[in-house]
Amino acid sequence: MTSPLRLGVNIDHVATIRNARGGMHPDPVRAAFIAAEAGADGITAHLREDRRHITDEDIDRLMERLTIPLNLEMAATEEMLEIALRHRPHAACIVPEKREERTTEGGLDAAGQDNLLRPFVSRLVEANIRVSLFIEPDPRQIEAAIRLKAPVVEFHTGLYAALEGDEQARELNRIADAAALATKNGIEAHAGHGLTFDNVVPIAAIPQLAELNIGHFLIGEAIVTGLDASVRRMRGLMDEARG
């Protein structure tokens, strides 16, 4: 039997629905508790610069009340660094961020941004925050993560999710090779973006992956089946893949 695979549930889009008309409902913090009870090992929340979904108050309440680890997704900006250092979540995942994008598009160019990223990684690590870089499954990006001394990388699985047939199989192999390379170099490998009930099993079966972060699909499915059922089914598929 291979090692257990952690599930991080991203609650951003509960906040998206709330913010569509204002007010307090649905509450992403309540959603975080439901996800935890259903089998989530951690909660992910992306505090964007424009606050389009998760807000500073959401992060305050999550840090105060959450009993499982919080993974704070953040852009490499001084504002976000200050927030992370003030709250000291369990983890911080540095992601690329464009104001015009609907969701995070592609991985961080760690290979081309060494000088920018180095102080962010070092200051977060010094604060005992587990740092991850959201990157493409590309050896150049993994080599950059090694140079930056990032303890974790999260591979962008959006291309895998968008492809079919032989092309998807090739991308799956690329992710598996990247996970093996990262692990060989002492970096913990995670993955996420675009994962669903239909495509998660091959990704979950990659033995070097330690964690999957899944959000938009689970929140969308929850509208029909409920968040508890949505998370439990994903948890079950992941466990079966590792069994």
Image (cartoon, grey):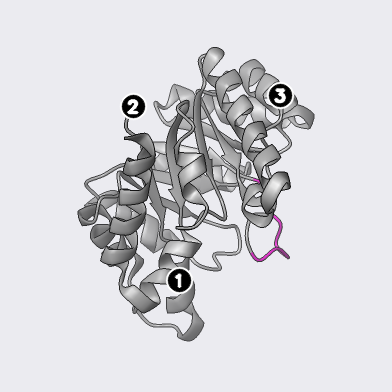
Measuring from the top left, give residue 74's x and y in whole percent: 55, 47
Sequence-wise, the earlier of marks 3 and 1 is 3
Magenta region, mostly helix, strand or loop? loop
Measuring from the top left, give residue 38's x and y in whole percent: 23, 56
Which residue: 32% across, 32% down? Answer: 4
View extreme (front): residue: 165
Q: Is residue 97 magenta?
A: yes
C-alpha span from label 1 to label 2: 29 Å
Closer to us: mark 1 or mark 2?
A: 2
Measuring from the top left, give residue 20's x and y in whole percent: 50, 82
Which residue is label 2 attached to? 3
As drawn, 166 above or below 111: below
Identity, as a three-letter code, of the amino acid under mark 3: Pro
Quadrant location, the C terminus? top left
Q: Secondary structure at mark 3?
A: helix
C-alpha span from label 2 to label 3: 24 Å
As drawn, 38 above or below 223: above
Which residue is label 1 attached to? 220
Left or right of 98? Residue 199 is: left
Which residue is label 3 attached to? 139
C-alpha span from label 3 to label 1: 33 Å
Identity, as a three-letter code, of the amino acid under mark 2: Ser
Which residue: 46% across, 77% down? Answer: 17
Q: Is residue 126 magenta?
A: no
- Magenta region: 96-102
